[in-house]
Amino acid sequence: MKRNIYILFTIGLFIRILPSHSVNLNTERLSNLKRLIENNIAYDSIAPIDSVIAWGQQLSPILEKENKMELSFSIRQLVVYIYSLRGDIGKAIDEARQMYEKAETMRYDLGIALSSAAIGDAYFCSNMPEEATDSYKEAIRYPASPSENNHYKEMTILKLIQVLILTQRTEEAEKYRKILSESKSIQTHQTLQFLTLATDVSYYIQKNDLRNANNCLLQAEQIYLSDRQPYYRTTYNYMQGRYNEATGNYNLALQYYNEILTGIRQKTRSIIYLQVAYAKANLLIEMGSKVEAAHLYEEISIVTDSVVAPSYAHRINSLRASYEENRMKVENKAEFNRIFMGGILIGVIVLGIMIYLVIHILKQNKKIAESKIRMEQSRLNAENAMQTKSLFLSNMSHDIRTPMNAIIGFTTLATNHIDNVERVEDYLGKIQASSTHLLDLINDILDMSRIESGKASVEEKPCDLVEAAEHLGSIVQSEVGEKGLRYEVDLSGLHHPIVMCDELKLKQVLLNILGNAVKFTPSGGSVSFSISEAAADADGKANYTMTIADSGIGMDEAFIKHIFDPFERERTSTLSGTQGTGLGMSIAKRLVDMMGGDISVTSVKGEGSTFSVTLPLETLDEGAVPAQGDCRRQELSEQLHGLRILLVDDNLLNREIATTLLEDAGFVVEQAVDGRDAIDHLSDAAPGYYQLVLMDIQMPVMNGYEAATIVRSMEDPVISHIPILAVTADAFEEDRQRALDCGMDGHIAKPIEIDNLLSVLEDVLLPA
């Protein structure tokens, strides 16, 4: 899922600094507006946000009649910005259009500059960062001459820096930070100082320079403590949330986010609310609270679809195209007048000038035509992006809601029929299946994000393809039996089953394809799985082809062309009741590409589909994969009985679930609530009292990495060498490696699965 489109509004909590004017309109409303302007705020308790919009629209025409154009346009930009912050994107676009048309008619440079900034704000809210960047750059380089107290350029630069930070263009952001530092206003104006520091916090967090981020945060805190106004408080809390999240203090970050959301709960359409809600949802994922995050994602998706409507992309791009075209016409006319006057003064060369003019105008008209083509293409691209996003959010809203409804519904039924054992067992089975499906949805999104960010890597180890095929068959066997499918496996073309490969990624690819084949094949149909091997090359690698064919519903040619695109799902999948993110095949394609292979598909509508995965794999001799004998399993089983475990987790529900599962498996479990508490337990107990530590990572007071490091440095060798396993929602490879680097012996991803735990314990307690 795209990162939060609303992260751009870190400084959007504020309205740009507007000039202070003396206006002879002695009314209470104008006085209130001037007070807001002089104090550089959007609204307060005396002038609420709706009143500011109404007063601005009422007073701007009056100010224009009195030829107070700078103040009029400044107020109109304020109105555009308030509409954007409130989530009224359509009204913001319409007001920006009227603002620009007025400025263009008047040939008013400052008005056009402010209009460009307003257009950038509308792009800001419409998830078009590249277009917003262009508009903001246009606004700050336009030859405008504001009054001494007008700081629109500084505020526009701050917004521009935020867009560049979001799109990870830190070098370009640094250039504009240097430009901003040269402004004397930054040194003297409190609000500009505060917003600049807020921007710097985001900048340094992006660069992972947490030391400088903390310094900027402390400086901003001094300003906030000296003037505890609401608009300072919201931004300060958001900065604290971002910083504490970056430093791993997740619980404290969550508190800051919740404080903001509680204060603006009734303004769920506002950009501020959506920004902070998205940040909170991402944090919940990191903390392992995936169900709560799913609820929040669903809320965000519903509101987002109403705020950032696809129709707005057309309206705003039409506005931009009109702006570019009219600007070119103005330039042509100005140049024509300049050359024509020169011809009058120098009559001798008038013919040559006119010829040049005609040629130049033709070139300019060509540029105008090309610009219109680019604007139209930009509009189409924006609409396609919006449609893709809307489709994904719609799918996610449906697919998350479906298992959540099942979980909630069957939980209620189980509670109502608690005395009926058979019905409760049936309901619990369905709850577990729905929970697994929900986790799969979230994992798909995380996998795609990981691949797109370049954090995924291939880890090759010896692998037995025969065992891998048997394992895949066992996973789908239940559904195959329920549907009465004929499942055939052909390994006759496999001559060297032991190979070097990333077994986990290979199984993920094949299981995705095999699972789809079983799902989309009607009862009584057939599914086949085969592996064939070509002769090895000089490097000792052979091409292995894994083929999965089914007699299912098939796919049409139009869908096959896009089957590996993200978020793509054929309509048939909806009709058949199959759910998913539309990411499975896209993930499979990218994993195969990472392994240096190729994936292809052929399909006939109504007849079935055939997928082929071809990988170049190094062949190994028999025995390269160590066998796991029954004696080792028996030895492990005997050692498990009565094994005393110290379970370390700050979440009460997680401790309760894990303790019950572990005790049912024969362990003795004692609990600690954080890293410091775990060290106290180990220090106070006799050496050898605990035989194993299951350590959560993200915890208050002291996290798991810190605790493990301290344990490994203890003087008592029995305590310092106690096996420690990381049990955490941080499930990526870099998380596992960091756990090992801190002295832990293994890594288990939440939720805990007993079979997986036993497998890890076998490696830790019974080394080969």
Image: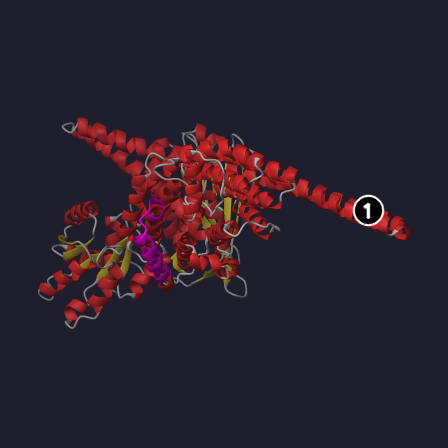
| Residue 223 falls in image quadrant | bottom left
Q: Nearer the viewer, residue 509 or 736?
A: 736
The magenta-colored residue range is 213-233
| Residue 108 falls in image quadrant | top right
The C terminus sits in image quarter: bottom left
Secondary structure beneath disc 1? Answer: helix
Q: Residue furthest bottom?
A: 715
The vertical placement of 291 against 502, above or below, is: above
The vertical placement of 626 against 102, above or below, is: below
The residue where tag 1 is placed is 340
Q: How is the image coloured?
A: secondary structure
> In the rendering, at what x and y percent does residue 457 appear?
43, 58
Is residue 680 among the parts visible in the rendering?
A: yes
Identify which amino acid the numbered label 1 is placed on: Phe
> In the rendering, at what x and y percent does residue 520 appear?
44, 34
Q: Is residue 226 magenta?
A: yes
The N terminus sits in image quarter: top left
